[in-house]
Image (cartoon, rainbow, N blue to C red):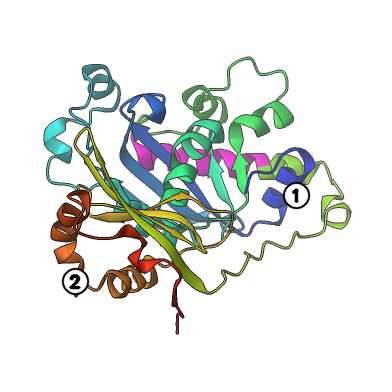
Amino acid sequence: MRIFGLEMQKALLNAEIMVSVDIETTGFSPDKGAEIIEIGASMINTKTKKILKNFSELVKPRNGKIPNKIIELTHITNEMVRDKRFIEPVIEDLGHFMGDYPLVFHNAYFDWDRFLEPLFKKRGICKNNDIIDTLTLTGVCLPDLKKKNLGYLCSYFGYKAENLHRALDDAKATGALCIKYKEILSSRNLNIKEAYPSRNKNTTSLPELRIKSINCWGKGGHRRIYILTSWGNLYYDLNKKNWYVANTSYDATINFKTVEAAFLKAVRINSINEIGEYFKNSIEGKNNKERAGGYVYTAL
């Protein structure tokens, strides 16, 4: 959950454990085809200043090769990611690693707003963790500092970053920077804890799952089955073999195993492995997309 100003400072001062995160990508904008090629995260105890555990994984991009300029910057080659997993299972594992702890980024607008949060939402995963941004905190803690990039800040504080522009090393550096800022804020004796009580971050409850309609769509090589449900508009991508959220009004994690069970029962097929034939028949007009309309599936 994006927080700003004194609320961010409060979150940092009150955090005993936090997870610093960094990503490496093929470009700047996912809207222009940029993809994540590496994710690194470090869980840190801010009192002992010790790393509890790390998360690090290379990711195979779906849309072609890694640009040469990115290879030069990160030293991540196409050969290194050739046999790695695609982003969907990696993002799920990252979500488990993060838990409910505050998340720390250096420039959360890039890592979180542009890439990670949309990916979590598309996978039906609700993450309400507080987001702490060390780029923003640099302006608070060191307002006269002209440079704010991570490499310069590491040098400023005497932190020896081993491999900048690799996700885990950048995540560790961001965590170390955040601990420095916590020390600076603590020295100012800010009475933030009393002024800003903890927020209620409970997620909303999902209603009974109801499938209202099913529609097969294929264009330009894409093959998707959209299901309009009481949980939102969801779809199964036959090419990627995964479920996704097109849109939903609920701030809750969606269990796609429940969705898949309801879908299979509604369309009367035994396994998701048969979905290709169902899609083909539907596109050819042999199936009635209204057949599942109004079907109610109650999750146990």
**Could you say which is closer to the camera, residue 203 or residue 249?**
249
- Rendered image quadrant of residue 251: bottom right
Q: Report whether 170 appears left or right of 130.
A: left
- Residue at (55%, 62%) from the top-left corner? 252
Q: Is residue 164 above or below residue 46?
A: above
Q: Is residue 41 above or below residue 160?
A: below
Which of disc 1 and disc 2 is earlier in sequence? 1
Residue 173 sits inside the magenta stretch: yes
Evaluate if marks 2 and 1 touch, with contact meaning CB atoms under 8 Å apart: no
The residue stretch that appears in magenta: 166-181
Q: Report if residue 85 is visible in the image.
A: no
The residue indicated by pointer 2 is 271
Give coordinates of residue 235: x percent, y percent: 35, 53
- Please state, as top left, top right, bottom left or bottom right, where the C terminus lies in the image: bottom left
**Could you say which is closer to the camera, residue 26 or residue 178?**
26
The residue indicated by pointer 1 is 10
**Dot 2: within a 10 Å radius of its alpha carbon, few (fewer than 14), some, or many (20 or more) residues?**
few
Q: Amino acid at mark 2?
A: Ser
Q: Amino acid at mark 1?
A: Lys
- Residue at (36%, 61%) from the top-left corner? 290
**Could you say which is closer to the camera, residue 198 or residue 121?**
121
- Residue at (16%, 56%) from the top-left corner? 281
